[in-house]
């Protein structure tokens, strides 16, 4: 009955609760401040374009994406993609998110070490996140020998998924730090708007912390189950 093992109760379920809390937190904070217009009246797209140009990244495009909170930077296409509310919005949340994604583009151009390392780990992490756990439980069902080999291989593959999540944390926190500094230094925010902008970005960062906690919890569970053999 490995579906209700000790590792699930001790690690995975608490981590899942944390993930749910983080997701609700970021949605709630975003919904609160997306309704608060910034005093200077810049749109997210205008801020992103200005920050990119200031950093000498005129070749990076600012595009509108679909869906809510779909904002991201695509290093392959050199494009900062902003959701409609962020792209066209003038809210504190819109500016914070736009500057954060622009921060990733600047990281890419600067050769920021953590981002480069994350990109190197990504192929193995993607492979491990899809096959690590299934391979492990296939091995768990089998007897000694081949079963043990599958379990060890599953843990090894899933480790790269965990490593990717861990490396992601400094990348995201650094992008947020860059965003706040750029918005404040460039005069896009007033002094009293800095704190709520940080709240938006900190709430978003919490989702990455929660994702890392979940990945670690799953890895610990696999290791505990492996210990039964």
Image: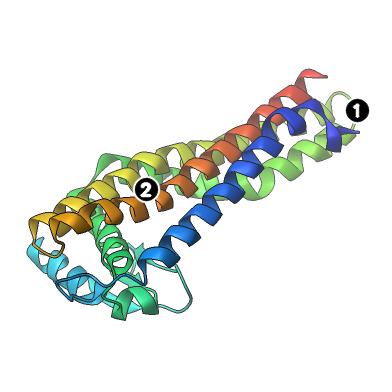
Q: Quadrant of residue 45?
A: bottom left
Q: Is residue 223 visible?
A: yes
Left-right relation of 1 to 149: right
In the figure, 49 relative to 187: above or below? below
Q: Please name whichever residue, 14 or 137, is drawn nearer the observer in this view of the structure.
A: 14
Q: Residue at x 54, y 54 (%)?
A: 23
Question: Residue 199, position in %: x, y?
Answer: 34, 51
Q: Position of residue 88 (x, y in %)?
A: 30, 81
Residue of label 1: 143
Name the residue located 49 percent from the left edge and 49 percent from the top edge: 207
User: Circle 2: is it few (<14), some (14-19), or many (20+) Cα within 10 Å?
Assistant: some
* Secondary structure of residue under mark 1: loop
Q: Which residue appears at 26% of the width and 75% of the height?
A: 90
Which of the two discs, 2 and 1, labels the residue nearer the N terminus?
1
Q: Which residue is mark 2?
A: 202
Q: Nearer the viewer, residue 186 or 39?
A: 39
């Amino acid at each position: 009955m490995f579906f209700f093992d000790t590792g699930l109760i001790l690690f995975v379920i608490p981590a899942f609760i944390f993930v749910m809390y983080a997701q609700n937190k970021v949605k709630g904070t975003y919904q609160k401040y997306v309704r608060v217009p910034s005093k200077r009246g810049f749109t997210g797209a205008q801020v992103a374009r200005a920050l990119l140009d200031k950093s000498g990244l005129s070749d990076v495009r600012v595009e509108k994406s679909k869906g809510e909170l779909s904002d991201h930077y695509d290093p392959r296409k050199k494009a900062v993609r902003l959701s409609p509310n962020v792209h066209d919005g003038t809210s504190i949340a819109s500016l914070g998110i736009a500057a954060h994604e622009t921060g990733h583009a600047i990281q890419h151009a600067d050769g920021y070490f953590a981002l480069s390392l994350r990109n190197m780990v990504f192929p193995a992490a993607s492979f491990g996140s899809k096959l690590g756990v299934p391979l492990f439980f296939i091995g768990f069902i089998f007897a000694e020998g081949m079963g043990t080999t599958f379990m060890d291989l599953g843990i090894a593959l899933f480790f790269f998924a965990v490593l990717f999540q861990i490396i992601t944390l400094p990348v995201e926190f650094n992008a947020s730090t860059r965003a706040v500094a750029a918005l404040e230094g460039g005069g896009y925010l007033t002094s009293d708007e800095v704190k709520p902008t940080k709240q938006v970005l900190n709430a978003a960062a919490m989702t990455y912390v929660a994702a890392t906690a979940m990945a670690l919890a799953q890895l610990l569970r696999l290791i505990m189950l492996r210990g039964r053999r």
